[in-house]
Image: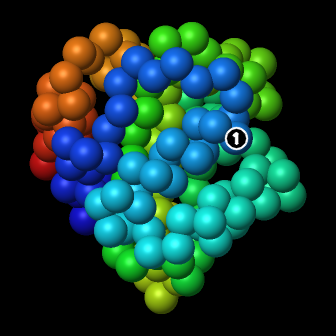
Amino acid sequence: MRVSDLLNRDSVLLHADISDVGDALGVLVELQESNGVITNGTAYYNAVCERERSGGSTAIGEGIALPHACNAGVAAPGIAALTLRRGIDWGAPDEKPVDLAFMIAVPTNVQSDHLLILARLVNLLSEPKLVRELRACVSREDFIMRLARAEASRFA
């Protein structure tokens, strides 16, 4: 499963003006819901917020967060991506504000896909050059293309 195939033009929002984690999560859920990935946005939003509260922050450092949850309100695996004009405090271990977030949504019956997607994203985002390029993208198509190119190169 390629993570770049789980993104489409309508699941990416670039350079948003969002000032807190709750609003960022809400926007990511809306992106997923508008694509039919999430069938119950409220339930998924609540599951992701609960994951942030009880499971610890999904910020992984270097300004990146990977919010996720397995929930019955998910129809199919999907990813939404968000870049922010200004970073927000997401409770990252390195205390850096987050300005790049990928939300992973996976139905409960394919939880193994959840781990695969998460691992692949972490691997891809460990490359500083790719992260810089994604932050600088001015079009959603370019964002997806750069991620797909990096994924094809790394996981050929």
Determine which quarter of the picture holds residue 44: bottom right
86 over 9 or under it: above or below: above
User: 73 left or right of 21?
Assistant: left
Q: Looking at the image, which residue is at 52% across and 73% down? A: 40
| Callout 1 crowding tier (Cα within 10 Å): few <14, some 14–19, many ≥20 | some
Q: Is residue 42 visible?
A: yes
102 over 118 or under it: above or below: above
What's the amino acid at mark 1? Gly
Q: Looking at the image, which residue is at 43% across and 33% down? A: 82
User: 16 left or right of 19?
Assistant: left
Residue 130, image x, y percentages: 31, 22
Residue 55, image x, y percentages: 80, 56
107 over 114 or under it: above or below: below
Q: Is residue 121 visible?
A: no
- Is disc 1 placed on a helix, strand or loop? helix
Q: State the residue position of label 1.
A: 22
**Can you name the residue that lies furthest to the right here?**
54
Q: Looking at the image, which residue is at 31% across and 46% down? A: 11
Determine which quarter of the picture holds residue 154: top left
Residue 115, image x, y percentages: 50, 65
| Quadrant of the image containing the N terminus | bottom left
Query: Is residue 54 or residue 40 the one in the foreground?
Result: 40
Q: Looking at the image, which residue is at 46% across and 22% down? A: 16
46 over 139 or under it: above or below: below
